[in-house]
Image (cartoon, rainbow, N blue to C red):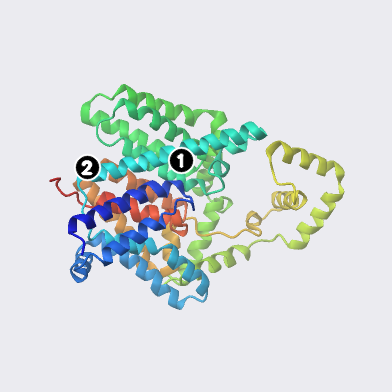
């Protein structure tokens, strides 16, 4: 039987592997290896009953466990068993990783090493992505490779943008040293190029709060910090970059969300339909997997555009050589797929010309684009309250320990949850299951 010291070393290096592998989001470096080692180490450590009792006595760990259990229970009254099983497997790290933290003991120096590993991994991935984007741009001349999902190589850019912002927050821990300037500038640039609007807005808020915090602490802000903030604001104000990063669209959508025409906003309409479906079963939700079907049934019921209209216009378009030449020319210039241009053009034209604001949802299927609504719709009001309780305890811990980094991470995750269903993808799940527990875990004194 292994000694306690060896078990703790296995825990640490498993977490180190996770902190390094998760930012790569690659099947060639699967984070699941770290999760499996964590749970095996937990099971073979001995004194299982005592450690399970510790889970019950640790509120934030217990909340993670119950959150998963509620999804498990909701699978029993779901009619979509395949989707329910997929989602339970997807969210399994929320259960496994949180349970193992009842046995993990980290010193402050070990935490700092884990943070450093995360920063190094994110910087490496950022360099790789920018390098590949430059090569693709040089080979094709298509500027799209430098922005949004093309820069993220087809993955949802919000997740790596989330990782970059986490690394930026961790870089600002403790005294700011000169060597941090270069990785900080790279990561800030990466956030803007990835064009995930919520993360850009969070970056601006955190930058402003950090400057105010520095003034409050020392009455004088480091020149490096001031230059960094000026650089961020300059990027934000740059009209060219604003267009590329969809910030102008973000401004328009925010205005729509707070107006009477909120349903003209894509998210406003989705949230409206989401609340409508939630009110049909607010206490226990619709069941794991069924919530997607309920939402999209509600959305598609409002779409007035028909398949026959799209097919008819597509056929007419295909026969019009003038339009097709123009479409092929645009596709060549922008690097679009040419296989179904006439159908895509027909959809775009009809959606633009017809009056219904819901036609933009034609043949598109969505999640709730809000994790709080998603959890409520899946497993009911208790699931929502548990999720909110996790954030409440995290904020309370951050305030008590005067931990600016923890509070910043909580704000980042909460705002990301407001605009995306972050726990519906594996790299959102493992991030939530990993980063908050590491930061919440009380540091033991170094021997």
Give the quarter of the image for residue 64: bottom left
Nearer to me, 313 or 8: 8
Q: In which quadrant will I find the N terminus?
A: bottom left
SS assignment at label 1? helix
Q: Nearer the viewer, residue 75 or 302?
A: 75
Residue 399: give x, y in percent of width and height. 22, 46
Farthest top residue? 223
How packed mark 1 is, by other alpha carbons closer than 10 Å (few <14, some 14-19, many 20 or more), is: some
From mark 2 to mark 1, how far is it between C-alphas? 24 Å
Please name the residue that numbered disc 2 is placed on: 109
The answer to whether residue 394 of the structure is visible from this angle is no
Q: Position of residue 354 (x, y in %)?
A: 71, 53
Residue under the image location 50 percent in, 74 percent down = 81
| Residues under numbered marks 2 and 1 in contact, where contact means CB atoms less than 8 Å apart | no
Check disc 1 and report the residue beneath it.
125
Left or right, 146 with reference to 407: right
Mark closer to the chain start, 2 or 1:
2
The residue that appears at 46% across and 38% down in the rendered structure is 126
Among the 4 quarters of the image, the one containing residue 363:
bottom right
Residue 288: x percent and y percent?
46, 70
Residue that sits furthest to the front in the current view: 1
- Residue located farthest toward the left when viewing the structure as drawn: 447
Side (left or right) of 312 relative to 148: right
**What percent of the width, then of the height, locates residue 446?**
15, 45
- Whether residue 12 appears in this view of the structure is yes
Q: Residues within 10 Å of mark 2 (few under 14, many from 20)?
A: few
Q: Is residue 121 above or below residue 278?
A: above
At x 21%, y 67%, the residue is 46
Judge from the rendering whether residue 58 lies leftward or rightward of residue 409; answer left or right.
Answer: left
Kind of element beneath mark 2: helix
């Amino acid at each position: 039987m292994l000694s306690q010291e060896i078990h703790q070393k296995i825990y640490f290096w498993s977490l180190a592997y996770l902190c390094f592998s998760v930012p790569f989001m690659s099947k060639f470096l699967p984070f699941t290896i770290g999760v499996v080692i964590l749970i095996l180490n937990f099971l073979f450590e001995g004194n299982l009953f005592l450690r399970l009792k510790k889970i019950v006595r640790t509120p934030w760990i217990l909340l993670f466990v119950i959150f998963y259990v509620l999804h498990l229970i909701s699978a029993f009254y779901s009619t979509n068993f395949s989707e329910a099983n997929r989602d339970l497997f997807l969210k399994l790290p929320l259960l496994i990783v949180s349970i193992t933290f009842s046995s993990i003991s980290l010193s402050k120096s070990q935490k700092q090493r884990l943070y450093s590993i995360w920063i190094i991994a994110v910087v490496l991935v950022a360099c790789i992505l920018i390098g590949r984007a430059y090569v693709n741009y040089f080979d094709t001349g298509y500027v799209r490779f430098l922005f949004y999902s093309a820069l993220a190589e087809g993955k949802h850019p919000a997740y790596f943008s989330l990782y970059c912002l986490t690394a930026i927050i961790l870089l600002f821990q403790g005294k700011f040293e000169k060597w941090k300037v270069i990785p900080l500038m790279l990561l800030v640039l990466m956030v803007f190029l990835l064009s995930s609007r919520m993360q850009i807005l969070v970056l601006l808020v955190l930058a402003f709060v950090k400057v105010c915090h520095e003034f409050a602490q020392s009455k004088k802000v480091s020149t490096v910090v001031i230059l960094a903030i000026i650089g961020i604001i300059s990027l934000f104000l740059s009209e060219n970059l604003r267009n590329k990063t969809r910030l102008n669209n973000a401004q328009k959508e925010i205005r729509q969300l707070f107006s009477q025409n909120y349903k003209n906003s894509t998210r406003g309409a989705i949230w409206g339909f989401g609340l409508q479906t939630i009110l049909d079963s607010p206490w226990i939700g619709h069941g794991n997997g069924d919530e997607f079907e309920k939402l999209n049934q509600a959305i598609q019921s409002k779409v007035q555009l028909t398949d026959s209209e799209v097919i008819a216009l597509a056929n007419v378009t295909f026969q019009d050589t003038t339009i097709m030449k123009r479409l092929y020319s645009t596709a060549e210039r922008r690097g679009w797929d040419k296989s179904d241009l006439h159908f895509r053009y027909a959809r775009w034209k009809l959606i633009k010309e017809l009056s219904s604001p819901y036609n933009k949802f034609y043949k598109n299927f969505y999640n709730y684009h809000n994790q709080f609504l998603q959890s409520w719709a899946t497993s009911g009001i208790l699931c929502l309250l548990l999720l909110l309780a996790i954030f409440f305890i995290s904020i309370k811990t951050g305030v008590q320990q005067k931990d600016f980094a923890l509070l910043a991470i909580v704000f980042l995750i909460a705002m990301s949850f407001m605009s995306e269903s972050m726990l519906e993808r594996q790299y959102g799940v493992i991030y939530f299951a990993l980063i908050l527990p590491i930061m919440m875990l009380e540091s033991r004194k170094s021997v």
